[in-house]
Amino acid sequence: MGSTEINNNFIKPANKEEITLYIQYLEKKIKNLDIEVNLLKSELSKLEHEVNSLKTENERLGELPLIAGNITDVLDDKNDRAIVNYPPNASYVVRVSNKLQYDKLSPGLSVALNQRNFTVMEILPTEIDPFIKGMEVIDNPIDVSYDDIGGLNAQIQEVREIIELPLKKPELFEKIGIDPPKGALFHGYPGTGKTLLAKAIAHETNTTFIKVVGTELVHKFIGEGAQFVREIFKLAREKAPAILFIDELDAIGSIRMEDATSGDREVNRTLMQLLSELDGFDQRGNIKFIGATNRFDILDPALLRPGRFDRIVEFTLPDEKAREAIFKIHMKNLKFEDEINLKSLVALTKDANGADIKGICTEAGMYTIRRNSEIISYDDFIKAIDKIMMLKNEESSSIEFYV
């Protein structure tokens, strides 16, 4: 009998060789069928997933939208109930959904409410104004310690007692029975280290550093400045332990006038909100407030009342000893000639502040680069001093002229 062709109409084999071919054919066909079954299963799984997604989407479309409200109180009556505020100025006692953990609710939270019965369905994310998010917020303060600050030994000692001690050892104040200072007001000449010391405090106490400039709180629309102040203090509470630093405080804290314009009245509203927030601070809490200003003479007396700024720290221009300490700090990483007379540099920088001295060291390095050298010479420092001090004198003359 001749060879037999393998196809769907396979003829019954007659010998051993044909039986082997027949078995191979069946195995191949089974393998192809397995592959086809797996492909169909995969396609079926995708279709089932798509059907489930469509069902879920259809259910969502059929649901009524939730409405936003705020929790004003959580009732401790074992019935999982809370009091919510729903605009316009209406309050309701409502139940909390079983899907939520009741112990996570607290006054002030934004929540989503069911339209039919106002049941609390979910907790909404905390809303913080984009302006507030854009502030300088350092969760892990930059590496600025007290050792990096020269000529401010007295200020550092006072600040350690005002800010650092209450944050690190609050139990001392509780044992004695006194309230620690809420915060401090830094005032003095520009460039004397007010912001730098505030950052150093945050570093030494391992707290979040939040900085905002007072001019950024001045807005033309009614209520905006006050709202931003509320948001800033809310952020500070969320980031606690924290140091809240407001620079150029005089922008919103100047003396209030009776014949104020509409813009002045808005600034006054912002100041009133700031005073309210300061009064609401827990003195033994883990948030400390620091204000800074170059114009202490124009601040509103209400800001300086005890209980708001408990300590006032003055930053004066550095004397010779302080300038020498500042020079050493900024020169410690510089490569300069051994014969440089530091005392002469100090003598040539009378009336210079810490920022000026830092600028002198930087400018001396720039002169070194310009002459293609890697070692800063005494002449480089002299040129830098002449340049920085001349600019400083020109700025002072301009200010006196306009005044």
Image (cartoon, helix red, strand yellow):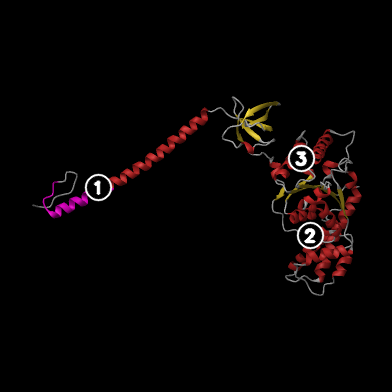
Q: Can the viewer see residue 166? A: no
Residue 100 is situated, as x and y percent measured from the top left of the image, at 59, 36
Alpha carbon distance from label 3 to label 2: 29 Å
Mark 2 surroundings: few (<14), some (14-19) or many (≥20) residues within 10 A: some
Residue 36 is situated, as x and y percent measured from the top left of the image, at 31, 44
Residue where numbered disc 2 is placed: 146
Quick one: 8 or 149, which is closer to the camera? 149
Quick one: 213 or 201, which is closer to the camera? 201
SS state under label 2: helix
Question: Along the horizontal axis of the image, is 5 left or right of 52?
Answer: left
Residue where numbered disc 3 is placed: 229
Q: Can the viewer see residue 276? A: yes
Question: Along the horizontal axis of the image, is 390 left or right of 90?
Answer: right
Residue where numbered disc 1 is placed: 29
Amino acid type at circle 1 is: Lys
Alpha carbon distance from label 1 to label 3: 77 Å
The magenta span reads 11-31
Alpha carbon distance from label 1 to label 2: 82 Å
Residue 297 is situated, as x and y percent measured from the top left of the image, at 90, 46
